[in-house]
Image (spheres, grey):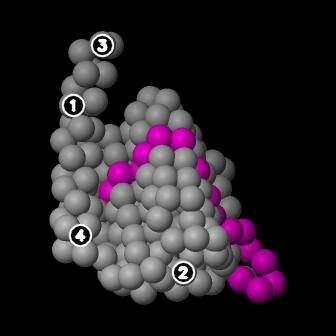
C-alpha cells in the first residue's frame, strides 16, 4: 500500500477503509472506517493534518493538501472531511472543511478556510474561494461558487445512494486485489 510516513508521523487508516495501491497517502492523515481512496489520489499531510471521516469516497485523481503555518494562520489550516462525503474525480481540496453528507462534483476546487456545510453540493468544475462558507442543503455552482437553489429530495437520495454504492464497490475492489496478488 502506498502509505508513507513524513518526519516520523505515519498515516492512520482504519482496517475497513480501502486505499487503492495506486493512491498515495503521506504523513499526518487519518482515514475513517469504510472510506475509499481511489487510483491516482494524493493525500499529503506534511505541513498539517488531514482527517477523513467514515464512509467517505475520495475519487480518482483528486489531490488533498493543507496549509502551512503563516503569520495570518499561526497554526496553519488542516483539511477536515466529515462522514459520508463524496469527493468526485479530479477534485482539489486545500485546507478546507467539508462537513458530513456533502458532495463535491468532478473537477471542483475548494480552497483554504472554506467550509462546505452538511448536505451541500458543489457542482462540477466549481471554485470555492478561500474563506467562503457554503450553506447546508444548497446546490453551489460556478467560479466563484454561488448558491443556485435548494437540493431536491431526489438529489439528496442520489447522494446517499452514491455513498452506499462506493462502499460496496470498494469492497469488491479490495477483494479483487487480494485475488490478484
Contact? badges 3 and 4 (CB < 8 Å): no
Give the mark nearest the N terminus, 3 or 1.
1
Which residue is rendered at x = 45% and y = 80% of the image?
Answer: 148
- Dot 1 falls on a residue whose secondary structure is helix
Residue linked to disc 1? 172
Which residue is rendered at x = 31% and y = 51% of the image?
Answer: 35
Quarter of the picture holding the C terminus: top left
Horizontal side of 1 relative to 32 (left or right) equals right
Residue 112, percent across and down? 64, 74
Vertical placement of residue 58 versus 21, above or below = below
Mark 3–mark 1 Cα distance, whole angstroms, equals 12 Å
Residue linked to disc 2? 146
**The quarter of the displayed image where residue 158 is located:** bottom left
**Image disc number at residue 180:** 3
Give the mark nearest the N terminus, 4 or 2.
2
Which residue of the protein is positioned furthest toward the top in this rendering? 180
**The quarter of the displayed image where residue 169 is located:** top left
Vertical placement of residue 93 versus 165, above or below = below
Q: Nearer the viewer, mark 1 or mark 4?
A: 4
Mark 3–mark 4 Cα distance, whole angstroms, equals 36 Å
**The quarter of the displayed image where residue 118 is located:** bottom left
Contact? badges 3 and 1 (CB < 8 Å): no
Q: Which residues are magenta?
A: 56-73
Q: Nearer the viewer, mark 3 or mark 4?
A: 4
Amino acid at each position: 500500500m502506498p502509505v508513507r510516513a513524513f518526519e516520523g508521523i505515519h498515516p492512520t487508516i482504519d482496517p475497513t477503509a480501502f486505499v487503492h495501491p495506486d493512491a498515495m497517502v503521506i504523513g499526518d492523515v487519518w482515514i475513517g472506517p469504510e472510506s475509499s481512496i481511489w487510483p491516482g489520489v494524493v493525500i499529503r499531510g506534511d505541513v498539517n493534518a488531514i482527517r477523513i471521516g467514515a464512509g467517505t469516497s475520495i475519487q480518482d485523481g483528486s489531490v488533498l493538501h493543507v496549509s502551512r503555518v503563516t503569520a495570518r494562520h499561526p497554526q496553519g489550516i488542516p483539511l477536515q472531511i466529515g462522514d459520508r462525503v463524496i469527493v468526485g474525480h479530479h477534485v482539489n481540496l486545500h485546507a478546507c472543511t467539508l462537513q458530513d453528507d456533502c458532495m463535491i462534483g468532478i473537477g471542483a476546487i475548494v480552497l483554504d478556510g472554506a467550509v462546505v456545510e452538511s448536505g451541500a453540493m458543489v457542482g462540477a468544475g466549481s471554485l470555492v474561494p478561500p474563506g467562503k462558507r457554503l450553506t447546508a442543503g444548497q446546490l453551489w455552482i460556478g467560479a466563484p461558487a454561488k448558491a443556485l437553489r435548494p437540493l431536491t429530495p431526489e438529489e439528496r437520495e442520489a447522494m446517499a445512494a452514491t455513498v452506499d454504492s462506493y462502499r460496496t464497490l470498494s469492497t469488491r475492489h479490495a477483494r479483487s486485489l487480494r485475488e490478484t496478488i
